[in-house]
């Protein structure tokens, strides 16, 4: 056994090495928090995963209805980007004094009528043939995002108004907090029919698409995205720029989105 003084010196050196290792800076990847519409869930998760494969960054999506996400940003949520399902809530953010940078319309979507697994209705295009209400029994409801604030519900109201069916269907709506919640009502068979985005219907193997709503029955369904704050960091700016790349747009189109029309048509 070594003499105590030798052993003590070895222990002292070991302690110094240990302290030096502990003192080394721990590398942490930067995080980018994206507050996004619920209808973007699957596509944005896939896009974030693709981006993280080649970038040292953590993309942290937070999903809710566009209205809820916007209110969270105004109330101080740590958002780096806001990704809305309509222009209204992006405009509302700006009106609340939130600085928006690099804002652009990135994607487009469509409204579709869906049926529950138990519903054997034949496919049809809304507005052609019998009114939608004739496909509901007296005690049945139509699942939609709440038209009071959910973008999908707002577009739904406009689409039904253009078909002359809003007044008959308004009392029969099952109003959900976001479009994914409306989808879930149909998936579980709690309502026989629902109106959601085409991308939501494509993401589910528990519903059937009956038909697309005419695209001229409501304003274009656009998805604007913007950086939040006066001084976004580089990681947020880089991810925001990548979202406009062909690589990113190919991910979104795989999930049924279309690139936004730069002319708003």
Image (cartoon, rainbow, N blue to C red):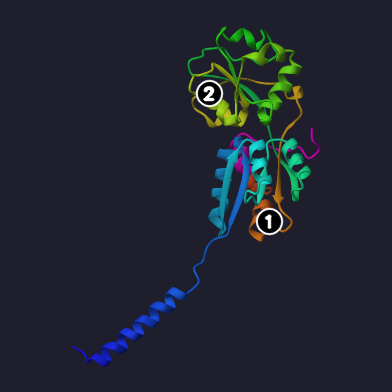
**Which residue is rendered at x = 75% and y = 47% of the image?**
103
Residue 161, relative to residue 73: is it above or below?
above
Q: Position of residue 181 (x, y in %)?
A: 56, 29
| Residue 61 vertical placement versus 129 (above, below) | below
Q: Is any atom of residue 207 visible in this view?
A: no
| SS type, badge 1 | helix
Was residue 264 drawn as part of the magenta stretch in this picture?
A: yes
Residue 121 place in picture, x, y as percent: 55, 12
Residue identifier under label 2 = 185
Mark sitting on residue 67: none
Looking at the image, is mark 1 or mark 2 earlier in the sequence?
2
Q: Residue at x 36, y 81 (%)?
A: 15
Left or right position of 141 against 259: left
| Of the two numbered discs 1 and 2 in the rendering, the one whose residue sits closer to the viewer | 2
135 or 247, which is in the foreground? 135
Q: Position of residue 222 (x, y in %)?
A: 72, 35
Q: Which residues are magenta?
A: 250-265
Q: Please say if 196 is above or below 43.
A: above
Label drawn at residue 237: 1
Report whether residue 252 is seen: yes
Which of the 4 quarters of the picture holds residue 221?
Answer: top right
Mark 1 surroundings: few (<14), some (14-19) or many (≥20) residues within 10 A:
some
Along the line of sight, the residue nearer the viewer: 195 or 96: 96
Q: Give the answer, above or below, for where 236 lies relative to 47.
A: below
Residue sitting at the far right: 263
Query: Alpha carbon of mark 1 to alpha carbon of mark 2: how far?
Result: 37 Å
Which image quadrant is residue 132 in? top right
């Amino acid at each position: 056994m070594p003499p105590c003084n030798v052993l003590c010196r070895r222990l002292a050196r070991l302690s110094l090495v240990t302290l030096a290792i502990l003192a080394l800076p721990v590398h942490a990847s930067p995080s980018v928090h994206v507050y996004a519409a619920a209808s973007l869930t699957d596509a944005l998760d896939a896009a974030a995963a693709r981006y993280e494969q080649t970038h040292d960054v953590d993309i942290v999506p937070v999903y809710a209805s566009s209205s809820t996400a916007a209110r969270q940003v105004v109330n101080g949520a740590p958002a780096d980007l806001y990704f809305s399902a309509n222009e209204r809530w992006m405009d509302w953010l700006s009106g609340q004094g939130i600085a928006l940078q690099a804002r652009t319309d990135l994607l487009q979507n469509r409204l579709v009528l869906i049926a529950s697994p138990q519903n054997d209705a034949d496919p049809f295009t809304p507005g052609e043939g019998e009114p939608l209400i004739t496909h509901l029994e007296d005690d049945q409801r139509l699942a939609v995002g709440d038209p009071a604030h959910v973008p999908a519900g707002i577009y739904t109201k406009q689409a039904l108004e253009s078909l002359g069916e809003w007044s008959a269907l308004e009392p029969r709506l099952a109003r959900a907090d976001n479009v994914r919640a409306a989808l879930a009502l149909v998936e579980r068979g709690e309502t026989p029919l629902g109106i959601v985005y085409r991308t939501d219907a494509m993401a589910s193997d528990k519903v059937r698409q009956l038909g697309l709503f005419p695209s001229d029955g409501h304003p274009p369904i656009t998805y604007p995205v913007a950086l939040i704050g006066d001084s976004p960091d580089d990681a947020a700016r880089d991810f925001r720029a990548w979202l406009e790349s062909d690589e990113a747009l190919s991910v979104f189109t795989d999930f049924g989105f279309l690139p936004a029309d730069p002319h708003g048509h």
